[in-house]
Amino acid sequence: MVKFIRIQCHKLLLICCFGLAACQPKGSLIYQHPNPDAYPIKHVVVVIDYLNLRDDIGRYWDFDSYYHQQTLGHLFAQVKTALNAAGYPEVKSHLLSSGLLIKSDLAVEHYWQDQAQDELLYPPYLMAQSKIKDEQVAQHQEFLTIMVKYLAQRRHDKSDPVSLRGMQMGYHFENMQMAPDTAIMYIHINQSAPGIMKQLGSLLLTGAIASQADYTHVGLDLGSHKQASIFWIDKDSGEILWKNHSNKWSTDQPLAQLLQHFPNNR
């Protein structure tokens, strides 16, 4: 059973995760590494961030811990099933959160199963981790932020080499203390009420810009309140072996719909 901790203070330096949309070339939002078999996977880490803030007539957005915990647990179970079916090792380390990437003291009203609680919550609003050190949490925040902000909605066309650039995190993983031959699945889902994405964008747009030229394009469309991104990364090389993004998928649909053409472990 996953144990969750409500985080009531802003302890971690977070990097922004949302940006302005730009024109995209034709192609697919799914990226597939041309040779994923070159990267043997012996260990798997899963990082999931899910957020669904609700509208309210009061000063603050509403956050229900019960439903977030339920959804995160359901997503994690689907991930483990999908990875097992694809022939990958059992997931031994995970980080499940809500609001992991929010770079502000954005307070929300706390609810538990639709019942208002006395306290306000501050990001990250929920966090559960297993066999992930505290110092690694900030690293995972940074990596996921870069991918969501710059790479999630990038389109890819095999006939256009330029569209395939930037599909590696390289040096970002050099200091990550993990076993060799580890793959990390990063999932970021935001299904908050319409209007919240734009407010978050104005709060979160400031922050460090990735130094690599491949990451200068800010790709997240703030006009859609549904955002779902998945990345599958080889830790040793920093190569993105597979990724997908959707602004239509929601958590009432099977996660398998987002895992199209996900590579098997051979």
Image (cartoon, rainbow, N blue to C red):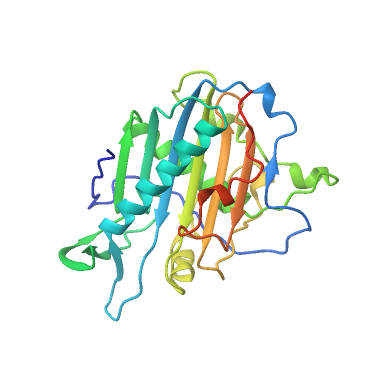
Instruction: Report the side of 7 relative to 23 (left or right).
Output: left
Instruction: Report the side of 179 relative to 221 (left or right).
Output: left
Residue at the image position 23 percent from the left and 45 percent from the top? 5
Depth order, front residue of 84/50: 84
Residue 230: image location, x then y, percent: 55, 46
Q: Count the marks: how many?
A: 0
**Residue 102 visible:** no
The outermost residue toward the right is 159
Residue 85: image location, x then y, percent: 54, 33
Depth order, front residue of 162/192: 192
Instruction: Report the side of 81 relative to 72 (left or right).
Output: right
For the C terminus, the quadrant is top right
Residue 162: image location, x then y, percent: 79, 45
Residue at the image position 30 percent from the left and 41 percent from the top? 128
The outermost residue toward the bottom is 57
Residue 240: image location, x then y, percent: 63, 36
The outermost residue toward the top is 180
Instruction: Report the side of 177 relative to 62 (left or right).
Output: right
Depth order, front residue of 191/89: 89
